[in-house]
Amino acid sequence: MIKKAKNKIISFFSSSEKVTNVILFLASTIIILIAGGMVFSLVSGTFPVFQEFGAKFIVSSEWNPSEGREQYGALPFITGTLWTSILALIFCIPLSFSASLFLGEYYRGTKFSNVISTMVDLLAGIPSIVFGLWGFYVLKPLLVQLGFNATGYGVFTSALILAVMIVPYATSLSNEIIAMVPTDLKEAAYSMGATRIEVVNFVVIPNARSGIIAGYILAFGRAIGETMAVTMLIGNANKIPTGMFDMGNTMASVIANQFGEAEGLKLSALITIGLLLFVITAIINFIGKLIIKKYSI
Amino acid sequence: MAKDITYRSTQMRLNKDKFALFLIIFFTIITTLPLLLIIGKLIVKGIGQINLDFFTKITPNTLEAMVALASGERIPGGILNGITGSLYMLLIASAIAIPTGILTGVFLSENPDKKYSNIIRDIADVLQGVPSIVLGIIAYIWVVKNITRGFSALAGSVSLSIMMLPLIIRSTEETLKMIPASIREAGFALGVPYHKIIFKILLPSGMSGLLTGILLSISRILGETAPLMMTALGSSVINFNIAKPTSAVPLLIWEFYNDPNMISLIWGSSLFLMLIMLSLNIIAKRIARKWKIQ
């Protein structure tokens, strides 16, 4: 009986190509279901907030979870996220730009560049929470000692750590693109007497520009969503940061901090922030990948 | 006169060139410094905490730690509950994500030009960039609220598996794309059924590429803390019940960090976690390099 059923199944499976195709197709629908389900769940989780506050949620800066007088606004976290991630991008650019020129142009293919490239890759393998610990125990006291700000917490400290964390993402892409710039173009410039930096300026960068930009866009997306390290360093103050050294909170860190005890309206407020985060990072990623796709054709 | 000017400007150009090279080397060294500093700090502070107990005992409670601290002894216990929890959730997440991801990757490489395939690729790209904390919210809504009715290992695994899925899909597709068409055609010419071509020819010849993708995705999720805080929560005992809160190594680091009595335990656990993730990374890269040569 079992053997018969087994034979039936086997003959069914080997009988036609169509079955295989159907199975492959079904597997491929899972990711669509996940993505669709994510959007659906996030959007339906935001209903209580939108009934209560409407679009005011995005522009209000009040965050008051005390019962009866509940007020939620996401503006402090949106500005906090923008502050930290834009600053992080600014700090990251000289680092990853130099590193990608080092790896893709100046020392391409040497043993030295192999070591550096492995190290940059490994940087991406360090867990976010370890970055946070290092920032907390090493970077923060250092900043206090140097007299940047009294507590060491704040936008600046988080942005520094974020910059280190996103360097590998920006570097690996732009280094690949820089290495792909055709040698004959560079040799033509050299033969006319250009110095190396002139070749970089007038040949390499113009040819690799869109790839480099795409790398930074993707790195920026990473910085926006990074949670643990920022949570440990930004000071978790629910207000709009007034300066580079002020404390604040990002969209990701407020979710990490307050999700545990959240219920009802507060939960919905946090889910709404999650949806905002999802939409922003999705758009940024999409633009980045679009540039890469266009460039590679 | 004119000669003088050209000489000066040439000298300036050469100086500029040297200065640029100096800047590039300088900033490149700065880029790699944090890695060395972090590894150094963890080794110096953490190596003394790693011993046999570290792998065979569960975490102490805060009272035990306080007593040990007060009497100047070393804090008893280890992180076994975190290690088993991490492995357990990794296993479930892999069981969900690896088969789905590989089959989807095969679909994409078998139907590369369909409009539908492009949609799948775009979705995978977008999912890959979604912050892990959002995946935590999703697993909370789906599993914690609706399936296990409480924080659970399953919820943690679901959030991790969503993180793994796009990575595995893309790495599978990239690998299979590189397999010469003649190999499949030889299979078809011999009348091998389609599913056997996939499972006996395509996947085995791309094995090292698939393995790289799997290892990289594992090393990416092993250090995740934020989504687990909202789904698996953590536990002070070893738990293999899929519907109960479960600990993980990064969760323990977070707990130690927030408990003044146990704060000294963060270094050993961080060192352990980082060494595992870095070695997974290096192994994956090694396998990838081997694959490229062949």
Image: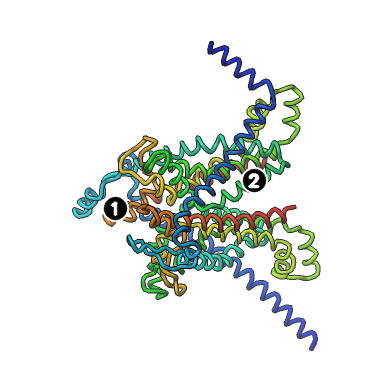
Q: Quadrant of the N terminus of chain A?
A: top right
Residue B108 at what x, y percent from top left?
67, 39
Depth check, front residue: B2 or A140: A140
Query: In the image, which is nearer the foreground, mark 2 or mark 1?
Result: 2
Label 1 secondary element: loop
Q: Using residue B43 as the reference point, say whether residue B291 is left or right of it.
A: right
Please tell me which residue is depicted at 76% across the width and 58% down the height of the picture: A183
The three-letter code of the residue at mark 2 reads Arg
Residue A294 at what x, y percent from top left?
72, 55
The three-letter code of the residue at mark 1 reads Met
Check whether the beta carbons of the residues at disc 2 and disc 1 lie within 8 A of each other: no
Q: CA distance from mark 2 to mark 1?
A: 45 Å
Task: Identify the residue position indicated by label 1 in the image.
Answer: B262
Q: Using residue A243 as the reference point, say whether residue B7 is left or right of it.
A: right
Depth check, front residue: A163 or B14: A163
Is residue B248 depicted above or below A23 in this figure?
A: below
Task: Identify the residue position indicated by label 2 in the image.
Answer: B121
